[in-house]
Image (spheres, rainbow, N blue to C red):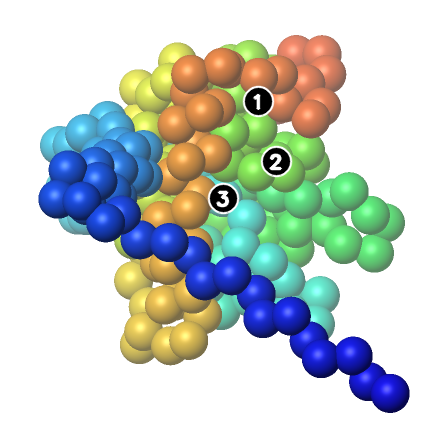
């Protein structure tokens, strides 16, 4: 014989007006707390987003990794790199720091980014690779602490560039963001934009706690040498 299933108890809703009011207040408080990180991010990046045509000149452009496809830059990463090429050709930047993931032997964002830039006319000696840019905070901290960057143009997609500016400013970089344009807003773009709502929480926590990057390592002279070759 099968035993009859005991029905699960239904969640009880507040019966009194005061109880319902407290429940509504709790929900509203939760919504406010959830929005605080995004509010901080937008405030920190306020006035710091420019176009490739009017961004203040800086010695260094930082291009954040955005994945590979068949060993080369993904379409979104290619847009970021194309923006760096335009800034270099316009004389807005002298050196391009490419920062991305090389945690596996078969996955190398920085070298793929370097190859893409050189094919489009950026001299190899003007490109510096950061192989431990595992996330945005790591890239910002390493740009400042390892490569000595204190002012930069930060290049990413529009859905990510505010977070990049906010975190790099927190890491000590006087940064202006330039959003790389896309031909169209596809599923990947909307996924990235939605993901930013959740990534803002981690970004705010990184800014508050200021954790060490996954790998800091010793200081590297790549940027200073690249700048010396430009002068």
Report x, y in % for residue 65: 55, 48
Q: Is residue 195 left or right of residue 15?
A: right
Q: Nearer the viewer, residue 123 or 192?
A: 192
Q: Nearer the viewer, residue 229 or 38?
A: 38
Name the residue tied to disc 1.
Answer: 142
**Total residue callouts:** 3
Q: Are marks 2 and 1 in contact (CB under 8 Å)?
A: yes
Could you say which quadrant of the image residue 173 lies in?
top left
Q: Are marks 3 and 2 in contact (CB under 8 Å)?
A: yes
User: What's the residue at 86%, 49% (across, down)?
Assistant: 105
Q: Is residue 148 left or right of residue 155?
A: right
User: How far is disc 2 from disc 1 in space, using C-alphas?
Assistant: 8 Å
Look at the image and tell me in which quarter the N terminus lies.
Answer: bottom right
Look at the image and tell me in which quarter the C terminus lies.
Answer: top left
Question: Of marks 2 and 1, which one's residue comes earlier in the chain?
Answer: 2
Q: Secondary structure at mark 1?
A: helix
Q: Which mark is residue 196?
A: none
User: What's the residue at 53%, 54% (across, down)?
Assistant: 66
10 Å crowding of disc 3: few (<14), some (14-19), many (20+) = many
Vertical order, 215 against 70 (above or below): above
Q: Which mark is residue 64?
A: 3
Name the residue tied to disc 2.
Answer: 133
Report x, y in % for residue 136: 50, 36
């Amino acid at each position: 014989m099968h035993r009859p299933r005991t029905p699960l108890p239904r969640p009880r809703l507040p019966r009194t007006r005061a109880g319902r009011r407290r429940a509504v207040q709790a929900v509203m408080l939760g919504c406010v707390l959830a929005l605080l990180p995004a509010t901080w991010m937008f405030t920190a990046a306020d006035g710091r987003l420019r176009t490739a045509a009017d961004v203040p000149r800086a010695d260094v452009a930082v291009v954040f990794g955005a994945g590979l496809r068949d060993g080369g830059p993904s379409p979104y990463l290619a847009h970021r790199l194309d923006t760096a090429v335009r800034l270099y050709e316009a004389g807005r930047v002298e050196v391009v720091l490419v920062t991305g993931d090389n945690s596996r032997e078969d996955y190398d964002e920085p070298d793929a980014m370097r190859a893409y830039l050189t094919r489009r006319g950026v001299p190899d000696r003007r490109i510096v690779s950061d192989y431990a840019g595992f996330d945005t905070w790591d890239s910002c901290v390493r740009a400042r602490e390892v490569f000595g960057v204190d002012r930069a143009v930060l290049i990413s997609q529009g859905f990510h560039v505010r977070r990049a500016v906010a975190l790099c400013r927190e890491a000590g970089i006087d940064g202006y963001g330039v959003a790389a344009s896309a031909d169209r807003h596809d599923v990947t773009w909307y996924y990235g934009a939605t993901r930013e709502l959740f990534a803002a929480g981690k970004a705010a926590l990184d800014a508050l706690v200021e954790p060490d990057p996954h790998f800091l390592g010793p200081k590297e002279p790549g940027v200073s040498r690249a700048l010396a070759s430009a002068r």
